[in-house]
Each structure stands twice: as C-alpha cells, then as structure tokens.
Amino acid sequence: MLDDFFIRAMLAGVGVAVVAGPLGCFIVWRRLAYFGDTLSHAALLGVALAFLLEINFTVAVFLVSAVVSLALLFLQRKATVSSDSLLGLLAHSALALGLVVLAFLTWVRVDLMGFLFGDILAVSAMDILIIYIGGAAVLSVLVWIWTPLFAATVNWELAEAEGMKPGRANIVLMLLMATVIAIAMKIVGVLLITAMLIIPAATARRFAAGPEQMAVVAAIAGAMAVVGGLFGSLEWDTPSGPTIVVAALFLFILSLSPLPQLLAFGRKSGTPIVKEGN
C-alpha cells in the first residue's frame, strides 16, 4: 500500500510531465534549450523575491521568468550582442542575484537544496491543484497557438507572409515556458526543470511520425519517467527529482535502440519532424 505523500507526488509529477512534454517539443525544434535553462536559473531569483515580499512562490517565479523572457526579446532587438551571449548574461545574472538576495535574508531559513533539486515528496493537495489548473491553461493556450507557432518554427518568413503573427505566438510561447517552470519548480527543482522539458521531447522524436504525435509521445515519456523515477527513488533511497531525470535519460537511451524503427510508423526513424533552428 502506497503512502498518501507518494500518491500526491505521482499525481503532481505526471501533471507536470503532461504539460512539459508538448512544450518541450518546441524547445527541441527551435533549439531553445539554453533559453529554458535561463528561465530556470531566473526561478531562484523569483524564490528570493517571494521570501522578501512575502508572496506566493509560484506567482513570484512566474513573474520573474516572464520579465526575463520579455527582457530577452527587447535586448535581442536593441543590443548588438549575440543571443547566446544574452542568454548567458541573463541566466547567470539572475541566478547570482537570487543567491545574493537569499544571503541577505538572514531571518529566513531557506532549504536551498530543495529549491535547486526539488522536493516532489513534499507536494500538497494545493500544489497539485495549481499544477493541474495551470497545466490545463497552458495546454489550452498551446492548442490555440499551435498552428502559427508550428508554422513559424518551420519557416518564420512564410508564417509572417501568411499573416499568422509569429512574433505574437513567440511571446506567448515564452510566457507558457515561464508558467511551466513556475509550476514545475517544486517537483524537480531549478536546476533540473530544463531536463524535464528537453529529454522527453528528444525521446519522443525517435518514436513519432508527426508533430502532434511527438507532443503526445513526449507527454507519455515524461509521465513514464516520473513514475519510474519515483519508484526508483523509493527502492534505492535516492533523491526523487534527480532520479526522475535519470529515468528520463534511460528512456532517451532506449530510444536510440532499434525499437523506434518498429514503432515509428509513417516515417523513417531518426528523420527530423521539422528542421531545427528555424
């Protein structure tokens, strides 16, 4: 008989995985891994501000991540520095600011390891409610902007010529990533969020015959990693968040075997669904 805390952890983890999988597909297609890493680093600054201003952690992390996203868009248009340099600047600056602010909060006892690597076994019923309500909202918006977002991923100029407003869809995508990072922080922590966005999507790429199918397979792969990681953590007494990521890594390694060739009907295994980097 599984304990209540384990059931809550599983529900929370699966909820995050189902949302992170489809969103992670766009991160993989667009090569935005470093951008996801930047937002996850900024999450620690959100935690520090939540302590300082005594507001909800999820709200604070979302606001900081959203500001960083919009700041990146602004700097890309105004600055002469390359995008990867801007991402590095924002990522490490936000992380350093967060650590400095936490150091000044001497009257607050902070579980820094919990924020960095997550504490999924400590999730409450309210956390699960936030994850599922927020996750449903993210998926609904993603479905709404799927066509212009995917079109812009394949060919930005063509999407713009057809009046799909790819710039607006891009801003919405960044805000959706900020939302997912905010609701996922307690599950896998600041340093492992990007892994949960990228690894299931990279795994699904080998199995899927189309973009929509890849999004579904990524969600399933993420859920499998959560369940496998939690049971592995229970069996071997290892940290839950990192174990979930290791389980996701195991699934990715499995996807490199001949198995995807048998399951990826409709296209040759390993053939990109979209051309990355556009």
Image (spheres, helix red, strand yellow):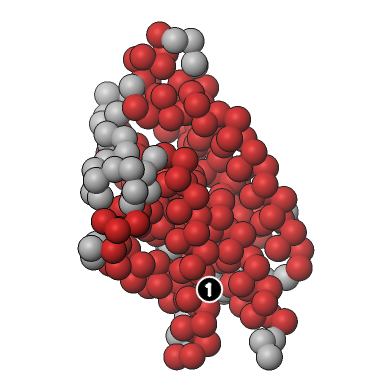
Percent across and percent down for residue 155 are 33, 22
Q: What element carries label 1?
A: helix
Amino acid carrying label 1: it is: Val
Quadrant housing the C terminus:
top left
Going by the image, does 268 lie left or right of 126? left
**Residue under the image location 51 percent in, 35 percent down:** 173
Going by the image, does 100 lie left or right of 273? right
**Residue under the image location 47 percent in, 28 percent down:** 149
Quadrant housing the N terminus:
bottom right
Residue nearest the viewer, comparing 178 with 163: 163
Residue 49 seen? no
**Residue under the image location 63 percent in, 73 percent down:** 9
**Residue under the image location 34 percent in, 71 percent down:** 250
Location of mark 1 (residue): 227
Based on the displayed image, in which of its 4 quarters is residue 48 positioned?
bottom right
Residue nearest the viewer, comparing 141 with 41: 141
Based on the displayed image, in which of its 4 quarters is residue 273 positioned?
top left
Percent across and percent down for residue 212 are 47, 40
Percent across and percent down for residue 23 are 48, 45
Going by the image, does 226 lie left or right of 126? left
Q: Compared to 240, does 266 lie above or below?
A: above
Residue nearest the viewer, comparing 84 with 107: 84
Residue nearest the viewer, comparing 120 with 117: 120
Based on the displayed image, in which of its 4 quarters is residue 124 positioned?
bottom right
Q: Compared to 124, does 16 lie above or below?
A: above
Q: Compared to 228, does 152 lie above or below?
A: above
